[in-house]
Amino acid sequence: MERKKFKIRKGDNVQVIAGKDKGKRGEIISVLHKKDAVVVSGVNIVKKAMKKKSQQDQGGIVEIEAPLNVSNVAIVCKKCGATRIGYKFDGDKKLRVCRKCGDVL
């Protein structure tokens, strides 16, 4: 199966635009291409029961970041805030740019 291409990548700063955490901002920890989802730090925190894996490992209920659908996040431009992404070619390089102000992201 072919890997889907998203306009956002690991390490991008994004803002949640829909759901229970609407308005929160964070950095993308990982991109899940098969599920069309991203994991954002500090956003969509859920409690999960974890089994004890070793003698030192603590089991119990832990809080982890759950994946969000990629359509529910928007990249954050330093000037304008949440925005969409466009592309511009600079010689042979393809650059991601802000659709509002035209700054390179």
Image (cartoon, helix red, strand yellow):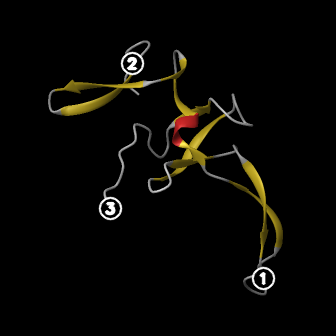
Query: Disc 1 marks which residue?
Result: 56
Q: Position of residue 37 (x, y in %)?
A: 53, 48
Q: Secondary structure beneath disc 1? A: loop
Displayed quadrant of residue 25: top right
Q: Residue at x 44, y 13 (%)?
A: 100
Left or right side of 39 for 87: left
Q: Position of residue 90 (x, y in %)?
A: 20, 25
Callout 2, which amino acid?
Asp
Give the crowd class for mark 3: few <14, some 14-19, many >=20 residues within 10 Å: few
Vertical arrangement, residue 41 with respect to residue 7, above or below:
below
Query: Disc 2 marks which residue?
Result: 103
Number of marks present in the image shown: 3
Numbered disc in front, either 1 or 3: 3
Callout 3, which amino acid?
Met
Give the crowd class for mark 1: few <14, some 14-19, many >=20 residues within 10 Å: few
Displayed quadrant of residue 69: top right
Q: Residue at x 49, y 49 (%)?
A: 36
User: First in sequence: mark 3 or mark 2?
Assistant: 3
- Pick the front one: 85 or 35: 35
User: First in sequence: mark 1 or mark 3?
Assistant: 3
Left or right side of 98 for 51: right
Vertical arrangement, residue 61 with respect to residue 41, above or below:
below
Q: Position of residue 73 (x, y in %)?
A: 56, 34
Query: Disc 3 marks which residue?
Result: 1
Judged from this view, the residue extending furthest toward the bottom is: 55
